Amino acid sequence: MNILVSNDDGINAEGIRVLVKALSEVSGVKIYVCAPDGERSASGHGISMTVPIMLKEENIDGVEWAYALSGTPADC
């Protein structure tokens, strides 16, 4: 099973790390993370229309890959 983890609190939020750790203990699960590069609360439905979206690879133990986006949670 593939699971995509995202949030509006940002890639460095403690909640993502806790969730990924718990999910990584489930057999047969592949975890992917894509979250904003910083706090984006209250912008969850907004999308980036006029600015480029920058992507940066992050290291999070227990995931297949993790990326921080400069855009909104919906962009992720």
Image (cartoon, helix red, strand yellow):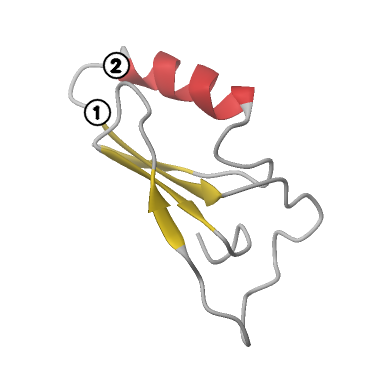
Residue indicated by mark 1 = 29
In the rendered image, the residue lying farthest to the bottom is 50
**Contact (Cβ within 8 Å) of mark 2 with mark 1:** yes
Looking at the picture, does residue 3 appear above or below residue 35?
above
Q: Nearer the viewer, residue 30 or 51?
A: 51
In the foreground, 70 or 17: 70
Left of 48 or right of it: where is 40? right
Pick the residue in front: 36 or 24. Answer: 36
Q: Is residue 43 left or right of residue 72?
A: right
Residue 11 image position (x, y, % from top left): 55, 39
User: Residue 56: which numbered mark, if any?
Assistant: none
Q: Position of residue 62 (x, y in %)?
A: 30, 22
The part of the image, by quadrant, that contains residue 22 is top left
Residue under the image location 47 percent in, 66 percent down: 54
Per the model, the C-alpha gap separating discs 2 and 1 is 6 Å
User: Which class describes the residues within 10 Å of circle 2: few (<14), some (14-19), or many (20+)?
Assistant: few
Which type of secondary structure does the marked residue at label 2 adopt?
Answer: loop
Q: Is the residue marked by circle 1 packed among few (<14), some (14-19), or many (20+) residues within 10 Å?
A: some
Q: 49 above or below 21?
A: below
- Give the residue at x 53% y 17%: 18
Secondary structure, mark 1, is loop
Name of the residue lying farthest toward the left: 28
Q: Quadrant of the rendered structure where residue 51 is?
A: bottom right
Position of 70 relative to 33 (above/below): below
Task: Locate the N terminus by quadrant.
Answer: top left
The residue shown at (61%, 57%) is: 73
Q: Number of labelled discs?
A: 2
Specify the label residue 26 is tagged with.
Answer: 2
The residue under label 1 is which amino acid type?
A: Val
Q: Amino acid at mark 2?
A: Val
The answer to which image quadrant residue 23 occupies is top left
